[in-house]
């Protein structure tokens, strides 16, 4: 049986565009089952026999139509979990999300993400869980520093592209502040102006030498380190448990571990 692989951009809009094109491609080519079509976020190094590969252009209108369909027919909870799967760093995420959406729409099941006995749902769940875990960590472990111009600045190094979900969390808690969150891994800035909407800017590298901190920032960081040391109970220090609750990869950007 011949198979078809649609290669889309590694972004939420790219994957959603791929889902739209997959339905269109199935109809135009007269393909009997969705199982013959797969989505990928990059072209494989080794191509398979009897498989056609087709690049897909990201189209924001098509992505919006798929988003509307998922929210309307499968609900907001399903949309959130699918979104978290799409921002993960797993190579099979696009295909897992695509077939989960197909199954959910076919069964009209608003609890489709609970059907873990289905392979595609289980893969999508694995992707979403990894993103959600990292998002939960970053909500707790992100540290802001005040710059000379009064802007609050935080740097993260996320495995998954969770910055679009991290920004609303801090925008809700710091509505009056101007702040920037920089994801070093994806070179993406999350920008928030006081009492205004936040937005993302991608593709610009940041030089640490260009950052000028406020004069009092060093003193406040030292006070915070002393506070963390003073509340620690030496006889109850448990490095293994601490590493489990606070993975090492988050610590370089945390004030108390510098």
Image (cartoon, rainbow, N blue to C red):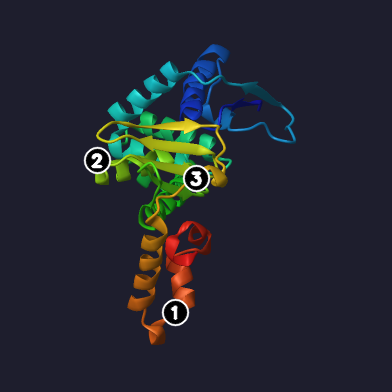
Residue 160 pos. (x, y %) = 50, 45
**Position of 138 relative to 233 (above/below):** above
Q: x, y percentage for residue 113? A: 37, 43
Mark 1 or 2, nearer chain start: 2
Above or below, comparing residue 80 to residue 130 in the picture: above
Residue 22 appears in the figure: yes
Q: Residue at x 57, y 14 (%)?
A: 29
Q: Rounded to the nearest whole Å, what is the CA distance between mark 1 and mark 2?
A: 38 Å
Point out the tag, 3 or 1, that comes first from the N-terminus: 3
Total number of numbered discs in the rendering: 3
3D distance between C-alphas at marks 3 and 2: 22 Å
**Residue shown at 26%/46% (left/top)?**
173
Query: Spatial distance from mark 3 to mark 1, Cα to Cα?
Result: 35 Å
Report the disc number at residue 238: 1
Among the two numbered marks 3 and 2 on one chain, the one whose residue lies closer to the N terminus: 2
Q: Nearer the viewer, residue 5 or 32?
A: 5
Mark toward the viewer: 3 or 1: 3
Q: For the point 48% across and 23% down, which residue is it?
A: 17
**Mark 2, secondary structure of its residue:** loop
Q: Which residue is mark 2?
A: 176
Circle 3 SS class: loop
Tag 3: Cα neighbours inside 10 Å, few (<14), some, or many (≥20)?
A: few
* Image mark for residue 256: none
Residue, far bottom: 235
Relative to 143, residue 184 above or below: above
Residue behind mark 3: 211
User: Would you say the residues marked 1 and 2 are in contact, meaning their CB atoms lie under 8 Å apart?
Assistant: no
């Amino acid at each position: 049986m011949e198979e078809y692989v649609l290669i889309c951009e590694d972004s939420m809009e790219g994957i959603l565009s791929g889902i739209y094109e997959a339905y269109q491609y199935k109809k135009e080519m007269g393909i009997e089952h969705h199982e013959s079509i797969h989505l990928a976020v990059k072209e494989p190094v080794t191509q398979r026999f009897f498989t056609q590969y087709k690049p897909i252009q990201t189209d924001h209108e098509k992505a919006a139509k798929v988003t509307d369909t998922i929210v309307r027919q499968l609900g907001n909870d399903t949309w959130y979990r699918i979104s978290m799967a799409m921002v993960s760093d797993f190579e099979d995420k696009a295909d897992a999300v695509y077939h989960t959406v197909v199954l959910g729409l076919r069964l009209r099941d608003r609890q489709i993400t609970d059907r873990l006995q289905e392979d595609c749902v289980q893969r999508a769940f694995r992707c979403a869980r990894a993103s959600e875990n990292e998002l939960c960590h970053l909500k707790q472990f992100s540290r802001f520093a005040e710059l000379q111009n009064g802007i609050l600045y935080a740097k993260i190094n996320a495995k998954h592209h969770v910055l679009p979900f991290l920004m609303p969390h801090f925008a809700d808690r710091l509505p009056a502040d101007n702040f920037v969150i920089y994801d070093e891994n994806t070179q993406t800035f999350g920008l928030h102006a006081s009492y205004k909407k936040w937005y993302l800017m991608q593709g610009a590298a940041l030089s640490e030498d260009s950052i000028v901190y406020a004069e009092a920032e060093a003193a406040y960081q030292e006070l915070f380190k002393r506070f963390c040391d003073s509340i620690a109970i030496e006889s109850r220090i448990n490095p293994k448990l601490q590493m489990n609750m606070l993975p090492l990869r988050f610590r370089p950007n945390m004030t108390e571990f510098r």
